[in-house]
Every structure is written in C-alpha cells, then in structure tokens.
Image (cartoon, rainbow, N blue to C red):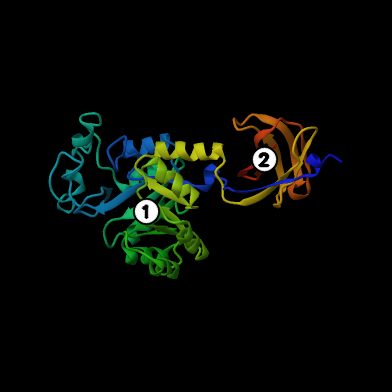
Amino acid sequence: MNQKLLSIVLFLIVVKSVAQQDFVISAHRGNSSEAPENTLIANQLAIDAKADYVECDVRRTRDGVMVTLHDSSLNRTTNTRGYLRSFNYSQLVNVDAGYSSRFGNLYRGERIPTLRQVLNQAKGRIKVEIELKESGLADDVVALVRELNMENDVIIISFNFSELRRVKQISTIPVKYLVSFFWGSRNLRQLQSIGGEFFGPPGVVSRSRVTEAENMGIKIISYTIDSEREMRLAIQNGQYGIATNYPRRAVAVRSELERNNTTINSIPVLAFPNPISTNFKINKSYKNALVRLINRNGEELVNYGLIEEVDNFEFKVNQNSGDYLLEIITGSKREVVPVIIN
C-alpha cells in the first residue's frame, strides 16, 4: 500500500466552542456608549444590540422609590444638582437625564427611570443585572422581582457582601459579588459560603483563576471590558461573560470568534492525506449529533446527517488539501472542529 496513504497526521488543536449562549454579554448601565447611562433608551439600545443582560444601578429617593442612577448625586448625568436622597420621586419627574455634557441635545428629555420601569421594559426581552448601590435594598428588590415573576431573569449584584448574603437568605435569586482590583481566593470562598453563583472582578481574569472559580461552582462575569482585545481574551480564557459599555462591539467579537472557531477542548483529529480519499475520526464522544463538513466561509461541503455515536463514526470525504471545519450540533450546543487535509 502507498506509504503516503498509511501515514496518519494527528492534529491536537486546543480550541473552544464559542456558541452564542455560552458567553454572556451584559450591557453596563445599558448601552452606555450610545445613550445616557441607566436610562430606558440605553436599555432599549442594549436590547437592539442583542446583549444578554442589561446592568442597572439602584438607589432610593428621599421617599423610598427605587430608581436607576449610578452616582449618589444628580450632578454628572442630569441637568440638576444635588444628592438623590434629597429629592422625592415627584421632584425627579421633570429632571432631564439626557447627559448633555456627553450627548448634547440628542437625548434631551430622557428621564431617571424607576427600577419597576426598567424591569417591565426588560421582561421577556433581556435579562437584568441589578446592582445594589446602597445598604438596605435587598428585601425590596427581591420583593419587586418576585412580584413581576422575574426570579429567573435577573442577577442581583453588589460590592456590598452583606446585601448579597441577605438576598440568598430570603430567595433563590442568583447573585454576583463585585470586587475591586485586590481580590483572591478568599473572596471566592466568601461567595461560595452563601451559595453565590457569579463573581465580578475588574478586567480580564486569567485562565487559572477561571478554573479555580469553576471548581468552586462559581462563574466569572468581569467588568468593564471595552476593547476588542480584552473581549477576545475573556472569551479565550473561559470566562462566563463580561460587562461592557460597548455591547454591540462585544456581540460582534463573540460572533466573529464563533465563525472563526476559537475553542477550548483538545480534540484529536485523524486524517489520511490526499490524494484518492480522506478518512478521519473524532476522539471525543458525542451522542445523537447533527454533523456536516463546512469550509471556513461556513459553506456546506458534506452533510452526514444525524449520527448516533460520533466517536465511532468514520467520516469520508473527497476534498482538496486545505483547512476545513466539522460542525457538530447536539441539542442547543454547537461545536466546530478543525480538520486539516494534507
């Protein structure tokens, strides 16, 4: 037999399947790069950008109404000066939150929304990260989320660990513990002690830290990741997600990496070199998977249909030398495996 046909090329390619549902994008204060932060228009633009979550900051007015505003004062983002706690909600109705120092008159007339308005806008359209900016908010926020039947559609987040602990004492709503630059294993253990699900450090987190968190049942959604380079690193390091001021950019990066096949699993691919025929197997178990061979542009070359056990299936294809992708779909999960034919 021809020696060339006997030689097998083994490719060990370290890759990660970046399916859209596997990496979440949270629009920080709404789509705050395109509209005034923490406003309904910013949240709508986050929905339009196809972000997975919109993040909002919650504080109380003097008369106890929960509104979304990042700063303790109105000075930076509105046409009014003073601390929020000095105003009753009725006094905020005509306050302009169009953030004119940044957006000019483009969003003139935009208002400071209540948390109820934000949740009603989001319901059925986008999930919400609710950041507790003050102490004593946990009970009322949980009550509102329950009233609106949105327990499965929100994450309650805070730098205030006591508030998160209270959330877990009275509900099963997921929480995210926000930390500053100086954090470590102690903070992860602290979150684990209350059954917390998510951890929010600043910047891109190393692969080893992501693994440490995952081993404790914790997922990393870091903040505030705005550059394409850091977005790619966050995905490649295995983070669960990011918060960003540029959700449209993040969605584009996520889609690009999915198309270009950036992945995590080490999947050996065995291929006989051309000419005549190419046979290969996947050394990884997939059950009842839809499989097809595609080129780098996503064009279908061979459709193998539904395969009961992929690892026992020998794929046959006649193609020219080059790089191809084997697309494997199981349920809602999609993986693509590089196949190199010499």
Reply above or below: 10 against 40.
Answer: below
Residue 168 is left or right of residue 131, and the answer is right
Q: Residue furthest left?
A: 81
Between 253 and 120, the one lying in front of the other is: 253
Is residue 92 visible to the viewer in this orientation of the structure?
Answer: yes
Q: Percent x, y for residue 128?
A: 40, 48
Q: Nearer the viewer, residue 228 or 105?
A: 228
Q: For the residue labelled by badge 2, is the local secondary structure a helix, a strand or a loop?
A: strand
Q: Answer left or right for 323 relative to 223.
A: right
**Which amino acid type is shown beneath numbered disc 1?**
Leu
Q: Residue at x 48, y 40 (%)?
A: 254
Could you say whether the residue bearing mark 1 is in a helix, strand or loop? helix
Q: What distance separates the C-alpha of mark 1 from that of mark 2?
A: 51 Å
For disc 2, the marked residue is: 339
Along the viewing direction, whichever of 153 and 274 lies nearer the viewer = 274
Q: Amino acid at mark 2?
A: Val
> In the rendering, at what x and y percent does residue 32 appear?
31, 40
Which residue is the site of mark 1? 144
Mark 1 or mark 2, which is nearer to you? 2
Q: How many marks?
A: 2
